Amino acid sequence: MATLLLVRHGLTEMTGPVLAGWTPEVHLNERGRTQAAELAARLAPVPLDLVVASPLDRCQETAQAVVAGRDGLQVQTDDRFGEVRYGDWTGRPLEELAKEDLWKVVQAHPSAVRFPGGEAMADAQHRAVTAVREWNDGLKPDATFLVCSHGDIIKSIVADALGLHLDQFQRIQADPASVTVIRYTEMRPFVVRLNDNGGKVDDLLAKSGQDSDAPVGGGA
């Protein structure tokens, strides 16, 4: 089964103060472009069989940085990895949204949330996890593929891999330009790395003879 590298896009001018969502024409800023270049350099030793990205510009630009210099590798696009559709919340400052009654529900019970004029968090998780499984099924054993997506989408995929209820996904963090690694096996996924912003990549290289058993006691 495949190894998935989940990459969050680099910084934009809206990242942090504003809920960008599906706002069009949100590009990486100077720092975000630097993050994408540094990420690409760090992942250069890792052979990638596939790169898929959200259709939004900030993810496309981050993914393009990763494939630059990799002969024959093109960025595939899948809308299911697009940001949560936040509806009427899109483009609003987070400081302002934090005063909404729905904000507390988003924090404590995201599985119950449907954004006004937008999407349910549970539906967003379902589409993203379904996309991961479908791309995974089409790859050869021991393949490594990269998906460039958004914070809440990445957190929801990780929650699924950990067997966590969606209401626990706010305990997971996915920073801009971070790498989260999930290794899928026949029995269960293993979350190998979470929100990595600068670690080495030696343990991301494919290994033969991987099985589905977790080491008792944690392993060496």
Image: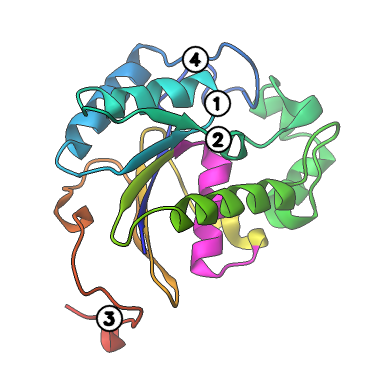
The Cα atoms of the two marked residues, 1 and 2, are separated by: 7 Å
Residue 138 coordinates in the image, percent (x, y): 45, 53
Q: Which residue is mark 1?
A: 55
Marks 4 and 3 close (CB-CB < 8 Å): no
Q: Earlier in the sequence, mark 4 or mark 1?
A: 4
Residue 17 percent across, percent down from the top left: 57, 23
- Marks 4 and 3 sit apart, C-alpha to C-alpha, by 41 Å
Name which of mark 4 and mark 3 comes first in the sequence. Answer: 4
- Which residue is drawn at the image coordinates 35% and 23% (left, top)? 64
Mark 3 residue element: helix
Q: Which residues are magenta?
A: 148-165
* Marks 1 and 2 in Cβ contact (< 8 Å): yes
Which secondary structure dominates the residues rendered in magenta?
Answer: helix
Give, as a three-letter code, the residue at label 4: Glu
Residue placed under numbered mark 3 in the picture:
218
Q: Amino acid at mark 3?
A: Gly
Q: Say whether residue 8 is magenta.
A: no
Image quarter where the C terminus lies is: bottom left
Identify the residue position indicated by label 2 in the image: 78
The residue carrying pointer 1 sits among few (fewer than 14), some (14 to 19) or many (20 or more) residues within 10 Å by Cα, namely: many
